[in-house]
Every structure is written in C-alpha cells, then in structure tokens.
Amino acid sequence: MTRISRRALLAGAGGTLAGSALGLPMLLHSTPAHAEEVSLATRLANYAAGLGYADLDAATIEQAKIHLVDALGCALGAFRESPVKAVRGLAPATATRGTRAATVLGTTARTTPDWASFINGAAVRFLDLNDTYAGREVGHPSDNITPCLAVAESEGRSGRDLLLAMVLAYEIDCHLLDTVQISARGWDHPNFSLPAAALAAGKLMHLDAARLAQAVNLSFAGHLASNQTRLEVISHWKGLADADAGRNGVFAAELARAGITGPAPAFEGKAGFFKMVSGPFELDEAGFGGHGHPFKINACQIKAYPAQALLQTAIVAAVRLGAKIPDPARISAIAVTTSHAGMQYSADSPEKWAPKTSGTADHSLPYIVARTLLDHEITAHSYSEKAMADPRLKALLGKLTVEEDAALTAMYPQKIPNRITIKLDDGRELSEEVDDLPGFGGKPMARPDAEEKFRRNARSVMAERQMRALLDAVWTLDRAPNLGTLFERARLKS
C-alpha cells in the first residue's frame, strides 16, 4: 500500500481547508500525527483530481459516446413505463433560472441535480437493458451516467467535461467491481457506485482533492445497499437502487462543496466499509486508466436484450434452437448448462423457477430460456403478466434443468457462456453454446450497432429525424460548450 509522510499528506488531500462555499469555517481536520497510510478515499480523490481530458485516448472517448447513446436509448425506451412515470411525478420543481437545476430527460421539466440524477437513472435502468461489467461482482456502470449528466448541465460544463466525468465514474466503479464480491456478504453492487458518482459529480463541481475525499466519505454515510434487492421476489427497487446511489453521490459532493465532512476513514475505519461490508482488499490506483493504462469503460459490455447480462448468450442460443423446432410441444427435455455465476444469480431460488414479477423474470435463466424458445426473442413484453402465466411456458419449465459446468465457469468473467441442449420426442438432440456477443468478450460495440440498438429502444417515442439529431449531438459532444443541445434534442414532442 502507498505510504506518504505527514507533511506530504497535509499538503495534499488530507490537509485543512480554508473555508466553505457558504463562507463558514471548514470542519475538515488534518490526519492524526500517528497516521502514515493514506486512506483509500484520499487516494481515489487524488486520482480523480489529477485526471484530465488530455489523458483520454480517442478510443476511450468514442466508447464514452457509445455508452452515452446506449444509456439515452434505454431511458427513452422506458419513458412511458409506469414506475418511471411515477418517479418522474415526484420531482420537486426548480423553476428559477438562476438556481442550479438539471433537466428531466425527455421533458422541459427542471429539478435539483440529485433528483434529476435519480429520475433519469430510473429510466436508464428500468428495462434492464443498459450496459454491464463483470468482475468479481457484476454491476451496471452506466447507472453512473445520469449523475454526470445532471451535474454537468447544472454547472454549465462542456461536453468534454461530461465525457471525462463519465470515464472517471466507470473507472472507479469497475475497479471496485473487480476487487471483491460483496453480494456474497449480503451487500449490493450499487455500493460501488456511491464513491464513483460522488467523485464524478465532485469533479464536475471543480472540487479539490480534499473535498473530493470528503465526498467519498459522505457517500457511504447512511447509504449502504442490501443485496436483498436482487434475491427472492424482485421489486421495482431493483431498477432504482443504483439510481439512488447516483442521487446520493451527487448530494455527497454538494455537501462536500459546502464544507461538510464525512465519517473517516470510510474504508479502513473500525466500523468502515472493509470491516462491515467487503472485508479488506487492496486497490492499486497506479493501474487506473491514463498514462499508458487502458480505461475500464473499454472493457464494459453492452446488452442486446432486456435481461440480466449473464443471460444474454442464453437468449441467442435459445433463439437459434427455437428456429429449428417448429412445435415446442415436441420438446421432451431441456438441459441448460451455465457458469457458477449464472447458477448463483439466475437459477438460485424457487422464485426464479416460477417468477411472479418482471424483475424476477428478467433475472431468471429458466424463464428466459423457455420464453425465448416459444417466442424466438426477448422484449419488454416478455415479462407481462400474460407471458408469465402462459401454460405453454409452465409446461416447458417442467422439462427444464440447470447445471453448472466447471469449463464454463473457467471462461467467466472474460466470457459469459451458456449451453442449451434439447431432446425431442423422436429422440433427436439439438445443442447450442454461445460464449460471447458483440459488445461482450473484449469486442466493444461500434457506432452502427449502437445506433441500431438506440433506434430499437427510442422509436416508440421518437421519429427518425429526432433520433438522428440526438445521435449527432452525442457524436459531436466533444465540441459542445454545454449540454443544452443534447437535452433539447432529447425532449419528446407533447
């Protein structure tokens, strides 16, 4: 672990600040004399403070734009869904132009940045179609885009500022996802979004390293997420948990800007994150993106279907098999073989074998395979009450088994393999194994694929001309002085 002298520490992120944005005395104190090790919050803050747009290579900038296009498409596709509408209706109005405010995507409404982050985050996440990253923990880094959008707009930042903040948020989130599996200890992956969103928001607020460290401390204080969100009966909160982390990250940065301090050390403390949540881990920020190291956003995966990331290859395998079977009634047995992660997250409880909510169904390997064999596709309509009650579906589920294969487990997380073997009533066997897809397995999605998926999602609320205009606004974002054009082109016609 990096060590630093007390003098150097006081000169950097751990020292006392002169005063707050409100003109009040700062409450931030220097580290006790006996402390030698720099806290992880401080090290992450120093990295965030030192990262500049010039550190981003062209491929990383392109991927940031692609992931933004993907997130916007997911949000627009979910715009009319009931939970998204319900959350949108809760936003406190901020009508005064002089105040810091952010836009609710698709509308002219403006609200506080933390609320805009939450509402827009709910829309991005609702269809379970936004991007993903598989490390020791599986998460959705694009859930951190909406805090960046809200703060970049409210602070009047440029398109380059937004792209830099996005890359930073992805970098923090993905490195934490790589490091430790907190779900095994009962905690949820949005906990890693807390410091990611706080640092990205603080970066856009032009906080110095000391205040950025306090934003990290504050992001954890009172905001830890339980993994019950993703177990047994899955509720609307599954699509809101990371949106809430983003909201809390923005709020933490705002508090830090005002001079408020948070419990420290947030990670290493006697009742800190290591002790209570993750267990101890090492994080080498020297390997973070920049200065010759690749950025994590280039390793993130973009889904093709509205379902859990681990199920994407199973859907493709089932589509291929379904095309070869004119009558699903002729199926006598279905054997699904998956990785340990696929088994743990997608076939781990009785609810996954008889889902009663859309949130459970789109995380169920048995359901997804059976539904795809019947329909030859998976869409948002695959999780309707009618689809879940389909007697043909229940018949197929009765013939289906799921097993773990060590060889498939060994491929994970570089690949997300699934194999489906079907036995027909005439004794024939058909089998398909799919290990990765475009946008997965180290094959980043390119613009044409990103645009095709965007159109598939947004066409229900946008005409082609408006979709083209919004796409062009993203592709030229690095030349935009602010985000006004982006939000204007994302506004839906009333």
Image (cartoon, grey):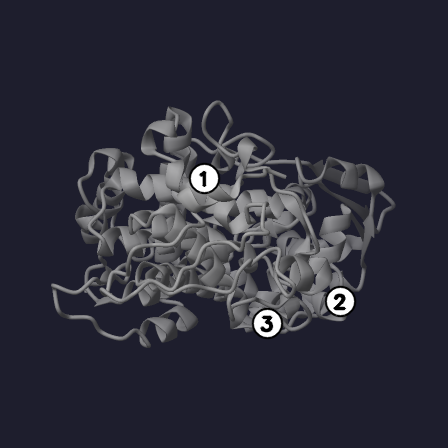
Mark carried by residue 466 = none
Q: Left or right of 236: which side holds 60? A: left
Q: Residue furthest right?
A: 427
For the residues labelled 2 and 1, say whether their Cβ atoms are less than 8 Å apart. no
Amino acid type assigned to the residue bearing label 1 in the image = Tyr
Tag 3 residue: 357
Residue density around tag 1, few if under 14, some if 14–19, many if 20 or more, within 10 Å: some
Tag 1 residue: 47
Amino acid type assigned to the residue bearing label 3 in the image = Thr
Amino acid type assigned to the residue bearing label 2 in the image = Ser
Disc 3 to disc 2, C-alpha distance: 14 Å
Disc 1 to disc 3, C-alpha distance: 42 Å
| Label 1: which secondary element | helix
Mark carried by residue 349 = 2
* As drawn, 489 above or below 191: above
| Label 3: which secondary element | loop
Pick the front one: 203 or 6: 6
Residue density around tag 3, few if under 14, some if 14–19, many if 20 or more, within 10 Å: some
Residue 160 point in image, percent of width and height: 28, 37
Residue 25 point in image, percent of width and height: 30, 65
Pick the front one: 321 or 284: 284
Query: Quarter-wise, where is residue 413 in the image?
Result: top right
* Earlier sequence position, callout 2 versus callout 1: 1
Quarter of the rendering occupied by the N terminus:
top right
Pick the front one: 95 or 397: 95
